[in-house]
Image (cartoon, rainbow, N blue to C red):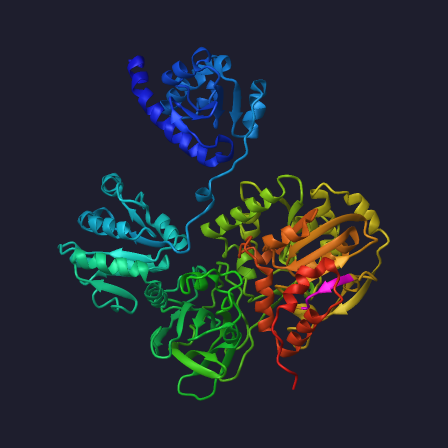
Amino acid sequence: MLRALMHWLTPIAESEAAHRAEATRAYFRSVLGAGTWRDGAWVSEGRAVLVRYADPAARRCWAREKRGPVHLVYFMDDDLLDEQSLGTLPPRYAAKIKRFATDQKQWLRTHVDEFWVATPALARKYADLKPWVPPLAPTPDLRQGAQASAVRLVYHGSASHAAEHAWLKPILAEVLTQCPQAALEVIGDAQLNRLWRDVPRTRVMHPMRWPQYLDHTKTSTADIGLAPLLPTPFNAGRGPVKFYDYARMGAFVVASDVPPFQGFIEHDQDGLLLPNDPALWVQRLVALVHDSVQRRRLQSAAQGRIAFTEAKPAPTPAKTTSVAQFKVHALARVGGEGGWRWAFDCPSPSTERSPSNTLEIQAWALPPQADANTVEKLELWLKPTGSAQVALKVPFNRDRPDVIQRVLQAQAPGHALLRCGVGVHLPLAGGHWDVGFALAGQCFWVASWELPDSAQQATEPSTTEQPELSTAPPVKPAAAATSKVIVGQEGWLFLDNDTNRSVDQFTGQLKLDAAGLKQWRDYLAQAAALCASGRPRCALVIAPSKEFVLPHLYPHTRGAVTTVDQVLGLPGPRPVTVDGGAVLRAQPDPRLGFMQTDTHWSNRGAMWTVLATLEALGLDAQAAQAHFAQDRYAAHKIAGDLGSKLNPPQIAATDFLCGTDPEKLTVFDNLLPNIGRVQIFESPGALWPQKLLVFGASSSYPMLRYWHRLFARCVFVHSAAHVDPALLDIEQADVLVLQSNGRFLIEPPNFEFDLARQVQTKYAQCPPERRRQVWAQGQREDWRSSVAPYAAMLSALPPPPAAD
């Protein structure tokens, strides 16, 4: 019986070995080189490499007495020689490894000239074999992900759609043959997998339960969703839910021109309706694959019918509190007259009013022929229906990368239209309200809301925790400002209603989705790869929001898992990571690490984190601490970026470092505000002669008071931890610091930042007076040669408008 099993396993092992060798060669191309697969080994001139298995044919061919002068290598990419390690594997797989690897240890030791292993862990375990760990060198196709130009079609028909699967298969096989840039995703069981598995570039996914399917459609993207329906009694009772399933993925629907899609989809407006003619389906699908303009138009219109960002879950209402719903009446059609595109994430027709009359509004809008200057002038307007007086004007205040990616089909980082969203909590009185989007004082009214007065709360006390709501009176026909500040205990101020939704991040209601976590893993792996050789030393530094360090002063409760927890807990390679929150919480008085009326840490908080970063990098933190030992601090009363938002402004004393203003030691400053700013410091009297490069956020500015005194050259690029690879080559820094603020982690950074392009974009957005200052910097001829690449970015800018 066992012998029969072994004979049965032999051809499987030989086939798998060939496929495994192909995969191994792809990842280790530089060491395996050109060759052919023969007799169980990868054979090149003068060398044969056995990959994983030594089957009978390989042992006969490559025995030392048979192979002649050929140098034989055994390449082990898993722990195959220790029988104890096989205990957790499936029995059939373990038997295969044992037969063709584990049991061949003695043969391998006798006949192999050199051993290779795939990981340092294997090299340590089998040190007696003196193995070599070859470097990973993937082929270009393994380093390259899905192309932006790829067109993704999806068909998510369940097992009840077996007839539609069979009808659709020859159609899509022909489309994929004619369109090599297209790929297909279907969902099906084992029987449907057999139906589709010979169609090229087709992925068949196993059926999922609803929660998993919902997550999949929220985190995967597609261009065209397919919804054929054949005439059956069962199909007669179906609904148009596939429109929403596909729209969540960013796709529009090509559907059969029958109910329920007939009358629901507007043909050639937000989808396509086609008769069940296979030849016509092939023709139209091939045309859509090649016509990106039409695809984007249909995708944009489909997005206008749904809200594709997940709204905050409604809190559980108190058992004695009644709520009232409101009604929405459309005044305009997305993409219709005027060319505006928009969507409201909330409120929706199912949204319930709270007893306090506070209403959350989340929306995005794109006016026709929008540009960066246009978005800066966008506002959300509300007015009582029938009134000529506008009661509320709210400037757009939120970045919407989802809109850029799904509606405009573009990369979000640095996009000129990124700030096309608005979010606000408003106390609104009951009645009829018109809502619209205004550009340069001209409003495009899109909807009318019917808001009933909120119900009165019963006198019995509630035992259910309620969300914190504004106590401001409902807005009547007068303007109201959005609160941007939370006043906590002891007069400490915290950020509210910001574009990063700080409160929701702290409470755990807003977290990174699967796509965001993957982007973070990719970013961390790239950063780790940078410092694999030991130069530069690289650290990711996370500056905390003060509620993470001083939660006892904050009115909200921290969630079980936050975005900071997610990023810190990601598995896989990463650079040295410094959690500034942990650093400040460990101090005798963490309150000294923050400014009471500002969002940022204090000079002391920045200094503590600089020292922690040095220690984590293996640098001499004690020498740095001694270097700072004579520092003096003086208290100054400031309003900060939070206190200045109150009326009257709130001020508080904060300790500032005396006499070490880094601005005096700058040898270059491009004077641009925020993202895109560059400052370069050269300090002959610094503690160390090395060079430091910082890709940082606003919390890096107080850290510069200390960095520039430690390193002879310090280059700061305001990029919120996004990395410009070109600057890595220019600077050749000894130390690299990637600094982001905790509330920014919801938007993962990347290695695609282009400083030169950002300088041009930010310059174009600056007011005329600032443009004149920046342009004057570019006309200077006295810059040091060490800043030439950065000065060149300014000298390439166009002249600003002349002063009045």
Quarter of the picture holding the N terminus: top left
In which quadrant will I find the C terminus? bottom right
Q: Residue at x 69, y 47 (%)?
A: 735
Q: Is residue 187 above or below residue 8?
A: below
The question of residue 103 being in magenta is answered with: no
Residue 146 spot, x, y in % from top left: 41, 50
Q: Quadrant of residue 293?
A: bottom left
Which of the pair 523/763 is nearer the observer? 763
Residue 358 in sight here = yes
Examine the rendered structure and indicate whether residue 727 appears above or below residue 138.
Answer: below
Residue 192's place in the image compared with 672, above or below, is above
Residue for point 27% across, 57% down: 286
Residue 424 relative to residue 55: left or right: right
The magenta span reads 666-671
Left/right of residue 62 with respect to residue 267 in the rendered view: right
Q: 522 or 596: nearer the eye?
A: 522
The stretch drawn in magenta includes residue 667: yes
Q: Is residue 9 left or right of residue 263?
A: right
